[in-house]
Image (cartoon, rainbow, N blue to C red):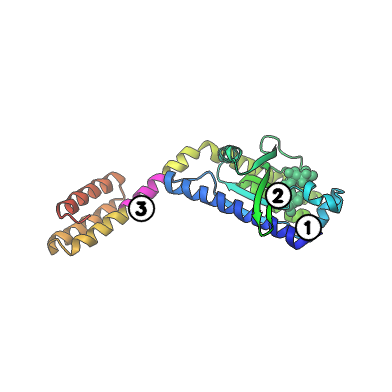
Amino acid sequence: MEWERILLTYKQAADELKAKFDNIALQFKKLENTSPIFIVEARVKTIPSILAKARRKKIPMEEIEAEMWDIAGLRIICRFVDDIKTVVDIVKAREDMEIVEDRDYVTHMKPSGYRGYHLLVRYPVYTAHGRREVLCEIQVRTLAMNMWAVTEHSLRYKYKGMIPEEVSRRLTRTADAAFMLDTDTNIIKDDILEAEKSNKSRERIILDITNSIEALDSVAKVNEVAELYHKFVDVMDANDYTSLEGFYNEIRLITQAYNIR
Ligand code: 0O2
């Protein structure tokens, strides 16, 4: 096997896919203040890990590329369970990758307690030696699902698959806790997002007021600017969004009158 060439092709696929989904997350955040994609991670399996999985699943060496689906892996982490469906729909609507299979371990939890939505995609890359198609597994999980999976993965590795009874019981409890965390945060999702939105617009208003007063400093009368500073401090002390908005509108009128912003 030409491991280096093969793994470099998978690395290119994983890197490209990460860049694509990172950009989607960025666009959501900039344009809608929130994104169904929270974190994107990409990895290529190491040679020992590929060989171990091939042995475990009895995949002959010459069939590894066709049969091992997750040599290139992308993990998309979401904050809310509902976001998983949004992300899956985004992936399914793309024309630069073909869905080969999907596995919904969110609705159908694995017996281990594992949850996540897996999409197997065929993705073309243009390498130094031409076009290649590789399989890549996209795992979509919530933060809680991911935390559980990473923990269970470490324990499984530590105990070589023979997790002691007591540890296994605790793992089941943490899976239940992760499920509850996901269910409850999903129910109050709108509340959480609304709170974050108003925090963000508060921060933006405060920054705008500060910049406006600074700009007025060079054109308005000293007394007028000092008065505005005092009023700003009072409004901040009051910690009331309506007063802040009122003061913001007042400042905007003044800056417009001075024709500075
Ligand atoms: P790694 O080190 O994360 O890459 P299966 O035969 O069902 O066990 P299969 O057929 O390879 O697995 O496909 P599946 O079910 O889609 O699982 C592929 C990957 O999903 C795994 O890759 C894990 O990353 C993750 N996964 C699936 N089941 C579990 C689970 O019970 N616990 C944890 N922690 N992760 C899971 P690898 O190669 O096993 O591991």
> Is 114 on the left-hand or right-hand side of 48?
left
- The residue at which mark 2 appears reads as 134
Query: Residue type at mark 2?
Result: Val
- The residue at which mark 1 appears reads as 49
Answer whether residue 201 is magenta in the image.
yes
Residue 235 visible somewhere in the drawing? yes
Earlier sequence position, callout 1 versus callout 3? 1
Residue located 68% across and 55% down the image: 130
* Front residue of this view, candidates 203 and 34: 34
Instruction: Name the spot of residue 81 as percent of width and height, x first.
Output: 58, 39
Is there CB contact under 8 Å for labels 1 and 2? no
Q: Which mark is residue 241?
A: none
Q: Is the residue marked by circle 1 packed among few (<14), some (14-19), or many (20+) residues within 10 Å?
A: few
- Does label 2 point to a residue whose CB lies under 8 Å from ligand 1? no
- The residue at which mark 3 appears reads as 203
Marks 1 and 2, how far apart at CA: 18 Å
- Does label 1 point to a residue whose CB lies under 8 Å from ligand 1? yes
Q: Secondary structure at mark 2?
A: strand
Residue located 45% across and 39% down the image: 191
Q: Secondary structure at mark 1?
A: helix
Marks 3 and 2, how far apart at CA: 45 Å
Residue located 63% across and 45% down the image: 141
Marks 1 and 3, how far apart at CA: 47 Å
